[in-house]
Image: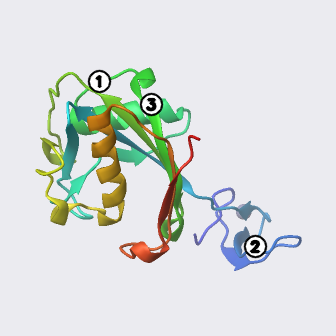
Amino acid sequence: MNFCSHCGHSVTCRIPDGDNRLRCVCDACGTIHYENPKVLVSVMANVGDRLLWVRRAQPPRAGYWFIPAGFMEHGESLQEAAAREFAEETGIILPPEAMQLYAVGSLVSINEVYVAFRTTLEHANCKPNAEVSEIRLFSEPELPWESLAFPEIADQVRCFYREVREGRFGIYLGEYRASHDPAGDKVIRVDG
Ligand SMILES: [Zn+2]
C-alpha cells in the first residue's frame, strides 16, 4: 500500500504505539491500515467414487488441475461463498446447505485461511467458462497427479478418495507453511 484509502495521503510502514508489527500508517489522518489473512473456500464434489476437478484457463498455473475454489466476498457466509464459487466455475447450482464442512486450515506462507467443503452430486452437468477450460470427473487412479496446481494437497485428496469409497468422512485441521515444501505441512483429524 502506498496511499491512504481514507484520505489519499501517503502512508509510512512503522510499528504503531502499543503494537508489535509493521503496519501502513497514514502520515496525514493517522489511520492504521491493518492487513489480515483472506478466506479461501473450496468444494470437493464427488459423483460416485470420482471427484470433480477444474482446469484453469488463465494464469497463474494455467492448464493445471484445481479443486473449485475462490475467495469469500463481503456479505457472504462460508457456505454461500462455496456454493457461489462452485457455480461460477462449474455451472452447477447448489444450495449453500449442500456444502458440508470438510477441512479448515492455514496457508501460512501466503496469509490465507482455507475452508474446504464437500458435497455429493448425482451427476455433473458442467459448463466450462472463461476461467475454466475443462471440467472432469477423475477417480483416484485416473487423476493426473503430476498436473495438480497444488501438489501439497495430494495427501488430503487421497484421504478424501478413500473416505468417498468408505462413505464416512472426517473433519481436518491443516497447516501449510511453505509452497511446495511438504516438510512444514501437517493435517490432523479433529472430529474426535
Ligand atoms: Zn489518511
Q: In this figure, which colouring scheme has been used for the structure? A: rainbow
Query: Is 18 on the left or on the right of 79, as rendered?
Result: right
Q: CA distance from mark 3 to mark 2?
A: 46 Å
Q: Quadrant of the N terminus?
A: bottom right
Query: Is 179 on the left or on the right of 24, as rendered?
Result: left
Of pointers 1 and 3, the one earlier in the residue sequence: 1
Q: As drawn, which residue projects farthest toward the right?
A: 18
Q: Amino acid at mark 1?
A: Ile
**Are the residues at dot 2 and dot 1 in contact (C-beta closer than 8 Å)?**
no
Of pointers 2 and 1, the one earlier in the residue sequence: 2
| Residue that carries the numbered disc 3 in the rendered image | 100
Name which residue lies at 30% across and 28% down. 120
Q: Callout 1: few (<14), some (14-19), or many (20+) C-alpha neighbours within 10 Å? A: some
Residue 32 is drawn in which quadrant?
bottom right
Q: Nearer the viewer, residue 49 or 136?
A: 49
Q: Amino acid at mark 3?
A: Gln
Q: CA distance from mark 1 to mark 3?
A: 15 Å
> x, y percentage for residue 12?
70, 77
**Residue 27, numbered circle:** 2
Name which residue lies at 27% across and 64% down. 60
Rendering quadrant holding ligand 1: bottom right
> x, y percentage for residue 93?
29, 24
Q: Nearer the viewer, mark 3 or mark 2?
A: 3
Of pointers 3 and 2, the one earlier in the residue sequence: 2
| Residue that carries the numbered disc 1 in the rendered image | 93
Q: Nearer the viewer, residue 20 or 122?
A: 122
Q: Callout 2: few (<14), some (14-19), or many (20+) C-alpha neighbours within 10 Å? A: some
> x, y percentage for residue 61?
23, 64
Ligand 1 within 8 Å of the CB at mark 2: yes
